[in-house]
């Protein structure tokens, strides 16, 4: 039999990646901004961060061009070219300082559509972000999904990015934006320095 | 700002597509096979079909049988499956007369499902797959540009027109339907369910 084979991948989870070239020019200013935030509000927000500090959330709706972080993120999001021009994005953000030994337990971001992170300071081994393949509450269905993935060759899984989970090492000057329903966690900061990032939620209007 | 932007896709739903290039050599025999089966097995209950006929299911285990052997040869050629995976297949034949369709459904109790299109007149009914994250991703998908959605196969649903000699294999959990046969002729196909078993599993005594 004369047979040809191809594979078509549908309904993926898109991860949007922005890399700010020459990030080193602004990095120190952003780091200072974050430590000032912590100094002004040391209590932060009570969250699932184990051992780290998170600021309270702030809105981007009131454009404050003097605010270095808001201005930076607003300029980055203006380049989000896969979103239609007619769509309005409402952003709420917060700042994270993960000291050595801290980590972020598995969670997702309800009541928004997209979520994201900007890595400002990311020492080596300071904690990958790990996304879980979308899960189902039906244990039989989940077993079938796991068995399907497990039955594929490593080569196929790697080429198609079909895995039970997928991780990104933090990279300074990089922004990742992902669907907010996606379960994710941040691994333990095993470095000797703080890991500094900004997280944000995007509501689509 | 000097920024680079790109998107990577993770956790897609893989659709495996086989094309039997010399299908004309098999087509007439398979059509006769389907009608002969129907004449012997006419009173089967309806399942997802509305107005069509589905045969009883049968194990694919007879290499001397034309349909068994064709389906087994294709399915066992699936290059993305590990070599040490055992597969168990149950199949059935469908004859959807003019006006008939298959309502939205999935195939519980197995891991992969598939269809081989044997006779498909024009407009005899596309197969439509629905995103497993339809509810969570609705607004997100709506916000993307058409170009982005098409480049990434990121839609609420996705359809394949039936093509004679084509077989598609998809995860059994994926909700799908077959649209109404708007032609004046029968639409003939063979469907199947695959159970996967990893031979490496060691059962405890």
Image (cartoon, coloured by chain):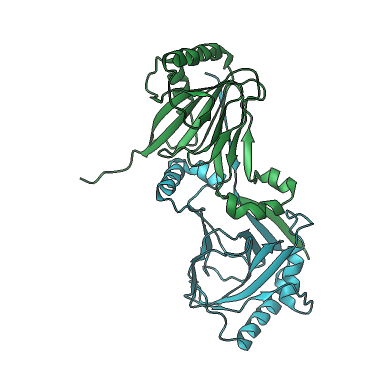
Chain colours: A cyan, B green
Asked if one can make out residue B189 in the rendered structure from this viewpoint, the answer is yes
Where's the C terminus of chain A, which quadrant? bottom right
Question: As displayed, is residue A41 above or below residue A7?
Answer: below
Examine the rendered structure and indicate whether residue A88 appears above or below residue A26. above
Q: Residue at x 49, y 25 (%)?
A: B74
> A168 or A91: nearer the eye?
A91
Q: Residue furthest bottom?
A: A40
Label tally: 0
Which residue is nearer to you in this view: A169 or B59? B59
Residue B5 in percent (x, y) is at 71, 57
Depth check, front residue: A95 or A157 = A95
Q: Residue at x 52, y 60 (%)?
A: A183
Left or right of B75 in this view: A17: right
Q: Estimate the x, y position of residue A45 in percent, counting from the top left.
A: 56, 80
Report the side of B57 relative to B125 (left or right).
Answer: left
Q: Position of residue A153 (x, y in %)?
A: 47, 41
Q: Residue at x 40, y 37 (%)?
A: B196
The answer to whether residue A21 is visible is no
Q: In the visual, does A80 lie left or right of B93?
A: right
Residue A120 coordinates in the image, percent (x, y):
64, 72
Q: Is residue A97 above or below residue B26?
A: below
Q: Relative to B6, is B111 above or below?
A: above
């Amino acid at each position: 039999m004369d047979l040809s084979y191809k594979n078509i991948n549908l309904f993926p989870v898109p991860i949007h990646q922005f890399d700010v070239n020459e990030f080193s020019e602004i990095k120190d200013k952003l780091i200072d901004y974050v430590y000032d935030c912590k100094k002004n509000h040391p209590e932060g927000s009570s969250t699932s961060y184990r051992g780290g500090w998170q600021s309270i959330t702030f809105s981007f709706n009131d454009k404050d061009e003097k605010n270095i972080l808001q201005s930076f993120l607003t300029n980055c999001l203006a380049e989000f070219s896969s979103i239609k021009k007619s769509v309005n994005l409402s952003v709420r953000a917060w700042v994270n300082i993960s000291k050595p030994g801290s980590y972020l337990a598995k969670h997702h971001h309800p009541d928004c559509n997209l979520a994201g992170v900007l890595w400002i300071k990311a020492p080596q081994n300071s904690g990958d972000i790990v996304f879980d393949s979308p899960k189902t509450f039906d244990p039989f269905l989940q077993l079938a999904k796991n068995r399907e993935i497990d039955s594929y060759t490593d080569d196929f899984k790697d080429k198609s990015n079909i895995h039970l989970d997928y991780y990104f090492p933090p990279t300074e000057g990089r922004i990742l934006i992902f669907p907010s329903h996606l379960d994710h966690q941040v691994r333990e900061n095993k470095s000797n320095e703080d890991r500094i990032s900004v997280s944000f939620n995007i509501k689509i209007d | 700002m000097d920024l680079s932007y790109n998107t990577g896709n993770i956790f897609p739903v893989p659709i495996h597509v086989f094309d039997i290039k010399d299908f004309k050599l098999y087509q007439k025999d398979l059509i006769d096979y389907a009608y002969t089966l129907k004449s012997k097995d006419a009173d089967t209950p309806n399942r997802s079909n509305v107005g069509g006929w589905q045969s009883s299911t049968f194990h694919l285990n007879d290499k001397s049988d034309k349909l068994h052997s064709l389906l087994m040869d294709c399915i066992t050629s699936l290059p993305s499956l590990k070599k040490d995976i055992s597969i168990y297949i149950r199949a059935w034949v469908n004859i959807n007369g003019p006006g008939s369709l298959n309502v939205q459904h999935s195939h519980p109790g197995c891991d992969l499902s598939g269809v081989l299109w044997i006779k498909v007149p024009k407009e005899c009914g596309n197969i439509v797959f629905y995103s497993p994250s339809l509810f969570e991703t609705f607004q997100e998908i709506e916000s993307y540009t058409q170009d982005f959605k098409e480049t990434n196969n990121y839609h609420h649903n996705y359809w394949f027109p039936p093509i004679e000699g084509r077989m598609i294999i998809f995860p059994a959990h994926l909700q799908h339907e077959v649209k109404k046969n708007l032609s004046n002729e029968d639409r003939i196909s063979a469907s199947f369910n695959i159970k996967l078993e990893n031979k490496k599993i060691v059962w405890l005594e």
